[in-house]
Amino acid sequence: MDFQEMQERARTVRSRYAEVEASSYGRSWTTEEIMLGFLGDVGDLAKLVQGKAGVRPRPDLDEALAHELADCLWSVLTLADAYDVDLGASFSSTMDELEEILSGPDA
């Protein structure tokens, strides 16, 4: 799946969530609430990273880690979409900047 397909899939899933939220809560989540959900997912991801280091082992660790990374990516794609950020272009330019810094005279 390429990046544009990922973005469109994330958008579709977000739209479905908005329908469920409207039915359950009378409105869809705000971007702030999506961000808070993302923070929760990052916390879950941190626990799984600890698991990979042997601190919080669990039998389904690899599957759970993959799932949580995908959840976090979905949140990033959803937030980028909500704020009209061209994440593909931004990622590319940010990596260019970092590579320039890393290949600079002090690197």
Image (cartoon, rainbow, N blue to C red):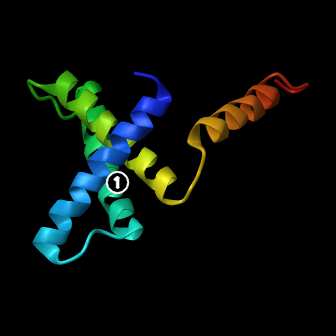
Instruction: Describe residue 87's horizontal placement relative to residue 102 as left or right.
Output: left
The residue under label 1 is which amino acid type?
A: Phe
Instruction: Classify mark 1: residues with Cα within 10 Å, few (<14), some (14-19) or many (20+).
Output: some
The front one of 20 and 92 is 20
**Residue 87's quadrant in the figure?**
top right
Q: Is the N terminus in the top left, top right, bottom left or bottom right quadrant? A: top left
Q: Residue at x 27, y 37 (%)?
A: 68
Q: Residue at x 65, y 41 (%)?
A: 90
Give residue 61's position: percent from left, percent from top.
17, 26
Give residue 97's position: percent from left, percent from top.
77, 34
* 27 versus 56 height, above or below: below
* 62 versus 39 height, above or below: above
Q: How many marks?
A: 1
**Residue 37's quadrant in the figure?**
bottom left
Query: Which residue, given by chain and number where applicable, does mark 1 sit on?
Result: 38
Q: Residue at x 82, y 22 (%)?
A: 103
